[in-house]
Amino acid sequence: MFKDIKANMRKIIFTSIFAAAVVLLSVLIAVLNITYTTNVSDKNYSLDNMLSHVLAVSEKEHSVYDDEASEEVRSYISSTLFSYGIENEIITHKDRWILNEKTDDIWQYKPKNIYAEIKGESGVNVLLVAHYDSCGYKIKYDEASEGSHGALDDGYGVAAVLELARIFSAEKSLKNGIKLAIVDAEEEGVLGSEALVNEYPQWLDDVNLVINVEGRGNKGPLYLFQTSDNNSKVIELYKKAGFPFSFSVAADVYGMLPNDTDLSPFLEKGFAGMNFAVLDSLKVYHNEKDVYESVDAVSLAKYCDTLLPLVDEYTSDARYGTLDYFEGGHDTLFFTLFPNALVSYSAVTGWIFFGVIIVLVGALIGLSLFKKRISWKRLLVSLAVDFAFILLACGLGFLLALIASACSGVNYHVLFVIGVAFDGGLLIIFSLLMAAAFVVATLIKSRLGFNHSEMAMGGLLINTVLAIVCAAVVFGGTYLFVIPVLLYALGEGVKLFVKNEKIKAGVTAAICSVATLFTLSTYISLLYSLYVSLTFGALGFITVFAILPLTMCVPQICGLFNNLTLKTEVKEAEV
């Protein structure tokens, strides 16, 4: 008897360590994706150059209302390009009407753009775009902020483009060329880039790809946060970038927002394009904190870490040297899986996966009911409990965000809350508490007679339904549901059809481990992205995505204890 107890204890301890290792590895993968660092000493670019550019352009406020400071910045950029041997010109475009929010006056303004070219053999070019104007006085959500110095938005982008220009101007022969457009008046409604596409379209006749280099926050990974439609060839090129960090769900959601950057006018004209920025944190966005002292050198370096290999690939490979190269592609779903590893697949494949999980989950539920492995009553109750828990966690998240905002003296808006003390820590603590509460709720359900298959099937059903909703609204986000459902459903299929207990236990553990690694690491990256994009005010919405993966992986991990001890915890279902 004591020998059996001892053996079971060893198995329980081993399984606990195994499950904890899988969870911790998932967290580690996500953290490495978000926080990778680089040794700039062995790179082909100069971080010191980039920092000096940011310092020069951000010495003063230089919005469209600051003529003298704007002229100083233009002169610096132009003279820097000339010092690299790059001919450039400053073109003054036609009048635009803008609203000065500080004086409430309507102004006439002529955008002044800087244009340059580094020629390639094919005569076809990639266009690098950044804007040099800083943000002036703004009123957002009834809150006013003074003008910024533009160190981050878009000093980061200008510095990156100038450093890339220096590097590639020294190349003796490029297969394909580079054009530069450092444009004006982005902060007043992308007026500079609109002037380029509408008044100077002949300059774009030999451009087949546009890369816009933006700034928003001061730190974090460099996101590819938007692409053009039919982006399969764009994404294939992006895979050549250093440390690609992007998610098709983010790109699709951004496309639904009423936001514009300098890439917008080019997309409207049908150009293939990419949009880059670091996004963390909004505390320094469009306000007086956007100064050189807020620069994060590591994050600034990531611009060249990412873009230098990408532009090098474009300029060194003749296959990109036709104007129609990026045309005729198809939409893709994509996500960063591991550091420096971007996974993508076509929208057609996505629809196939989507159809497979609907059939697979339906068949699993039907067979499990037929074989009396689960009770439909307990399945529905488990489903209802999980759904109620998600709604409760969402409500508590919004309540916490509201209370924290009030305590910090910050006005609350669902998609724009900055200045809450310890907001990142609050998000992590609250998410962990909700995760722990969900685990406890799962264990309670188990004690009340729900078996792991019933709870797992409930989680699969919730996520399948959400996959259907996501497919109708944001198809680029369906990988969040489809791939985990597919993997966990395969594990449930093994339990149904494999008779040998040892094989069943091993295969189920392997599938569960892979599914959990993918699911948790992907969702942690998503949670970070939602936080830096939507801010702490959206804590309730963010919390939903902290709970959703748990509805699948917690019952499966709990089931590992039974599978690895070669026991089957399946109750006889009620007829």
Image (spheres, grey):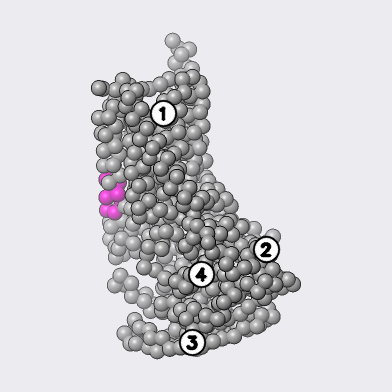
Q: CA distance from mark 2 to mark 1?
A: 51 Å
Q: Which residue is mark 1?
A: 559
Stretch of the chain drawn in magenta: 392-399
Q: Which residue is mark 3?
A: 93
- Identify the mark at residue 131; answer none if there is no mark: none
- Quarter of the image where the C terminus is located: top left
Report the predominant secondary structure element of the magenta stretch.
helix
Q: CA distance from mark 4 to mark 3?
A: 21 Å
Specify which label sits upstream in the sequence, 4 or 3.
3
> Which of label 1 and label 3 is nearer to you?
3
Taking the view exactly as shown, the residue that stands out farthest to the right is: 172
Taking the spot 41% from the left edge, 44% from the top edge, the residue there is 354
Specify which label sits upstream in the sequence, 1 or 3.
3
Q: Which residue is mark 2?
A: 317
> Helix, strand, or loop for circle 2?
loop
**Percent from the top left, x then y, of residue 389?**
29, 42
Q: Nearer the viewer, residue 303 or 137?
A: 303
Q: Nearer the viewer, residue 448 or 375?
A: 375
Specify which label sits upstream in the sequence, 2 or 1.
2
Label 1 Cα crowd, 10 Å radius (few <14 / some 14-19 / many 20+): many
| Type of amino acid under label 1 | Gly
Above or below 554: residue 258: below
Q: What is the quadrant of residue 210 in the picture?
A: bottom right
**Percent from the top left, x then y, of residue 233?**
56, 59
**Percent from the top left, x then y, of residue 93?**
49, 87
> Which of label 4 and label 3 is nearer to you?
4
Taking the spot 48% from the left edge, 70% from the top edge, the residue there is 270
| Type of amino acid under label 4 | Phe
> Which of label 2 and label 1 is nearer to you?
2
**Residue 409 makes an appearance in the image:** no
